[in-house]
Image (cartoon, rainbow, N blue to C red):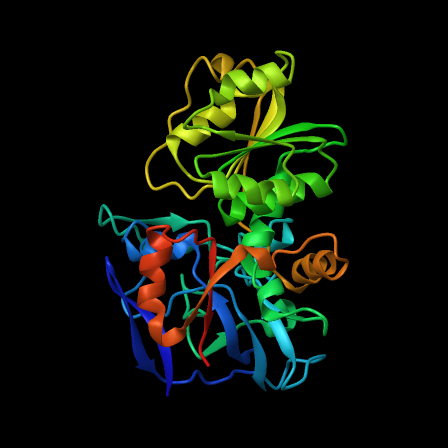
Amino acid sequence: MMKAAVFVEPGRIEIAEKPIPDVGPNDALVRITTTTICGTDVHILKGEYPVAKGLTVGHEPVGIIEKLGSAVQGYAEGQRVIAGAICPNFNSYAAQDGVPSQDGSYLVASGRCGCHGYKATAGWRFGNLIDGTQAEYVLVPDAQANLAPIPDGLTDEQVLMCPDIMSTGFKGAENANIRIGDTVVVFAQGPIGLCATAGARLLGATTIIAVDGNDHRLDISRKLGADVTLNFKTDDVIAEVMRITGGRGADSSIEALGLQSTFESALRVLKPGGTLSSLGVYSSDLTIPLDAFAAGLGDHRINTALCPGGKERMRRLMNVLESGRLDLGLLVTHQYKLDDIVEAYELFANQRDGVLKVAVKPG
């Protein structure tokens, strides 16, 4: 048996005893050494995103291979590895059509209206469709495609952002169509927004404007690449962006929170022909303002994303960290034992004590 954090009902995630998973030929059993809590897990806790009762939550695994399936080659038991939060099998039409994060569709109950429908997030399996990573062990499906060895010089805390937060934030920057010399506005400087800021810098943006209501997070954003920081509580963000750009508007914007207000602001700062890259997980319908959208005549592009997974994506992200171009260990502000994860959820969900990310360790 093993300990695992399971979804009980809206408002309750608790530690429970569950059987250690059996390993199939294409699987790997990974002993978790470090995992974390994501904003999406908080949506699950609140009942805003439906999952099955009793499901082990969490989707960001760092650990050691305990047991390998008979068909998995190129890995060894005892090896340190990560797997992406999105763990596709690469056999679906979507994956072979160039969108591996969308690994097919599954019929699920919506949870809110009682109806059924397809949700195009089937590449996200950990803590969504199968048991996740906030446990002593996790079963990694299609391990040949999803396990990525951790370079010897990197700590658990340094690579903890790779499975989801770093991959998602970088995808936001990639989806923003950033060119060398661009001006980019990043709305919200939580962990994903901070990684989007760092990704925009790596892609060649030379004026990165970070927006948040927390001065501490804005200070961190400067360390990760922001050139200008705006606190929306005291600054007129749209007016400032227009002033900085000489009235042209930003080349692109990245929305990393998932609110109507930030989405709308991200649209309003764009130049004609600009790109809005949306990373937020939205819990209600969005409305596109007619004027901000130029009645559909502004040549704007709106791109959405689910974080890319797979071993090649993880390898590339760890290459960035190993190169020394970026250190995301500073985003890990708190550490908790798995036994204390309910307390960690309370801290993270309420954004107390300057929390950015929590390292959760079963040991």
Q: Based on the displayed image, in which of its 4 quarters is residue 37 positioned? A: bottom left
For the N terminus, give its image quadrant: bottom left
Q: Is residue 119 left or right of residue 69?
A: left
In the image, residue 88 sits, relative to residue 260, either above or below, namely below
In the image, residue 5 sits, relative to residue 213, either above or below, namely below
Residue at horizontal 48%, vertical 57%? 357
73 or 207: nearer the viewer: 207
Q: Is residue 272 among the parts visible in the rendering? A: no
72 or 252: nearer the viewer: 252
Q: Based on the displayed image, in which of its 4 quarters is residue 161 positioned? A: bottom right
Residue at horizontal 59%, vertical 14%? 243
**Percent of width and height locating residue 296:** 51, 16
In the image, residue 121 sits, relative to residue 135, either above or below, namely above
Residue at horizontal 51%, vertical 84%? 23
**Percent of width and height locating residue 198:** 64, 44
**Percent of width and height locating residue 32:** 50, 76
Residue at horizontal 42%, vertical 44%? 281
Q: Is residue 191 left or right of residue 12?
A: right
Q: Is residue 2 among the parts visible in the rendering? A: yes
Q: Is residue 29 left or right of residue 72?
A: left
27 or 314: nearer the viewer: 314
**Percent of width and height locating residue 236:** 47, 20
Q: Is residue 56 left or right of residue 46?
A: right
Q: Based on the displayed image, in which of its 4 quarters is residue 92 positioned? A: bottom right
